[in-house]
Image (cartoon, helix red, strand yellow):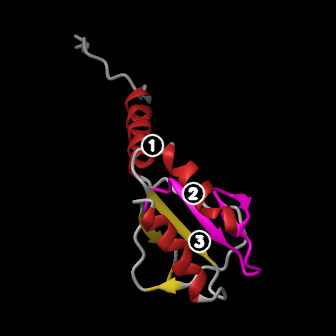
Amino acid sequence: MAIKSRHKVDAVFSMSSMTDVVFLLLIFFMLTSSFITPSGLPVNLPSSKSSTIVMQKVTVSISADLKHYVNDKAVDPDRLEEELARALRSEEEGVVVLHIDKSVPTEYLVNVAGIATSLKARVSLATKPDR
């Protein structure tokens, strides 16, 4: 008398639950990663011990040869206030991130920061992390 089992074990493994987990992890890491738009200008930033990430809305860059840029657009230093005011009008919160080359004299940094402050914008200085 042979006893036969009605319940056979199926050796097939379903990968659908594994792909769900992978997609959920992908979505999690995409949402928690920081969205930083690097400046396309060759600016050698100074380093600092603590570097916080600020969402870049309006960027002002000064290269080593003292050329001024607002949002990667070349601007004459005499017209910097007009261009900065125009760029800040389109933003809800006035945040200006300064990308100043470390060889640029401090007076240029103070001048740009003063213009941004007079336009009621918050000023943040971009640095690279100290290693």
Residue 131 colored in magenta in the image = no
Q: Are marks 3 and 2 in contact (CB under 8 Å)?
A: no
Closer to us: mark 3 or mark 2? Answer: 2
* Amino acid type, mark 1: Leu
Could you tell me which secondary element the residue under label 2 belongs to?
helix
Given residues 84 and 31, the one toward you in this image is 84
Q: In the rendered image of this protein, does residue 128 appear above or below residue 33?
A: below
Quadrant the N terminus occupies: top left
Given residues 7 and 99, the one toward you in this image is 99
User: Which labelled disc corresponds to residue 99?
Assistant: 3
Q: Disc 3 versus disc 1: distance between alpha carbons?
A: 32 Å
Q: Residue at x 43, y 67 (%)?
A: 117
Instruction: State left or right for residue 53 relative to residue 63.
Output: left
Q: Disc 3 versus disc 2: distance between alpha carbons?
A: 14 Å
Q: In the rendered image of this protein, does residue 26 appear above or below residue 116?
A: above
* Amino acid type, mark 2: Leu
Q: In the rendered image of this protein, does residue 98 appear above or below residue 22?
A: below
Instruction: State left or right for residue 108 relative to residue 28.
Output: right
In this figure, which residue is indicated by the disc labeled 1?
26
- Local crowd size for mark 2, using a 10 Å CA cut-off: few (<14), some (14–19), many (≥20): many
Percent x, y of residue 119: 45, 60
**What's drawn in magenta, residue-wise?**
54-77
- Local crowd size for mark 1, using a 10 Å CA cut-off: few (<14), some (14–19), many (≥20): few
Percent x, y of residue 75: 72, 61
In this figure, which residue is indicated by the disc labeled 2?
84
